[in-house]
């Protein structure tokens, strides 16, 4: 049952919007708009590669910031822009309304702004940058690749895909995608078509289809969360990014050292 609009908006206001101590709130201009974002730097060299972290339909919440924190611990400068101007979706109906209201052109401009922000940090204009998106954010990460954005890696977690040769033709960046076979939002057969088209076009793609699970399996705050699948996905992404967007040996732990494979709860 959908909540009444007044109650839903009241719940949005109750959701805590403070950032985690590991990072900081930054802002950058996109046209006339000032975009808020969560930025977290890794220990080590100032010119470490960067990742734009794109949130689900729920908004820039604590769960997304924990994901950015974890990517930072992997050796990346992570920036998570707020696509909703400070609002959070406190219930599924409101979150879906906010997602549908999001203008795709504005979202892509915010992504480009986040990429520019990473390359303006610490004078690291040559910093390699990738994108990591979850749900709605996964679709936006793919949209950036479809528009030929200058990114060195694109990671999609259960974001909607394209199934025509014309749509995927502009993709230049390597693609890593994680999906669930029981996802009612992103159908297994569409993902298979997407993968086949990319391979036929000679694109660099790796698709992980997790059997028997649904949408949102990386989000520890949702009922569909799959702890073991999430842990495995973090490990796969870490290894893939180390090849496509390397942080160099200085950012890797010593051989045999324990490596966290998922964000802390």
Image: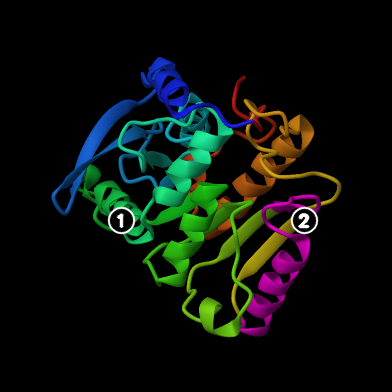
Residue 28 in the image, given as x and y percentages of width and height:
20, 43
Total numbered badges shown on the rendered structure: 2
Q: Can residue 56 be spotted in the picture?
A: no
First to last magenta residue range: 179-202
State the residue at coordinates (59%, 76%): 203
Quadrant for the C terminus in the image: top right
Front label number (1 vs 2): 1
Q: Which residue is mark 1?
A: 106
Left of 212 or right of it: where is 168?
left
Secondary structure of the residue carrying tag 1 is helix
Nearest the eye: 262 or 75:
262
Which quarter of the figure has residue 225?
Answer: top right
* Spatial separation of the CA atoms under disc 1 and disc 2: 30 Å
Nearest the eye: 102 or 3:
3
Q: Which mark is residue 258?
A: none
Q: Which mark is residue 209?
A: 2
**Residues at marks 1 and 2 touching, judged by CB atoms closer than 8 Å:** no
Q: Is residue 193 above or below residue 155?
A: below
């Amino acid at each position: 049952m959908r909540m009444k609009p007044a109650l839903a908006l009241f719940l949005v206001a109750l959701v805590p919007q403070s950032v985690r101590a590991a990072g900081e709130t930054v802002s950058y201009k996109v046209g006339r708009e000032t975009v808020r974002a969560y930025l977290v730097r890794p220990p080590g060299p100032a010119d470490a590669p960067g990742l734009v972290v794109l949130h689900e339909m729920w908004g820039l919440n604590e769960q997304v910031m924990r994901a950015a924190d974890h990517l930072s611990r992997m050796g990346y400068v992570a920036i998570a822009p707020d696509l909703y101007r400070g609002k959070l979706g406190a219930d599924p109906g409101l979150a879906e309304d906010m997602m549908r209201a999001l203008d795709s052109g504005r979202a892509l401009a915010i992504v480009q702004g986040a990429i520019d922000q990473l390359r303006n940090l610490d004078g690291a204009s040559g910093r390699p940058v990738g994108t990591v998106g979850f749900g709605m954010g996964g679709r936006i990460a793919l949209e950036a690749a479809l528009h030929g954005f200058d990114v060195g890696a694109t990671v999609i977690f259960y974001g909607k895909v394209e199934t025509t040769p014309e749509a995927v033709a502009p993709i230049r960046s390597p693609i890593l995608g994680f999906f669930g076979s029981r996802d009612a939002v992103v159908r297994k057969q569409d993902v298979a078509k997407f993968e086949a088209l990319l391979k036929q076009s000679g694109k660099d793609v790796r698709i992980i289809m997790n059997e028997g699970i649904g949408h949102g399996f990386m989000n520890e705050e949702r009922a569909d969360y799959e702890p073991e699948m999430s842990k495995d996905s973090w490990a796969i992404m870490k290894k893939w990014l180390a090849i496509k967007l390397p942080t160099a040996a200085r950012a890797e732990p010593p051989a045999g050292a324990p490596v966290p494979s998922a964000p802390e709860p």
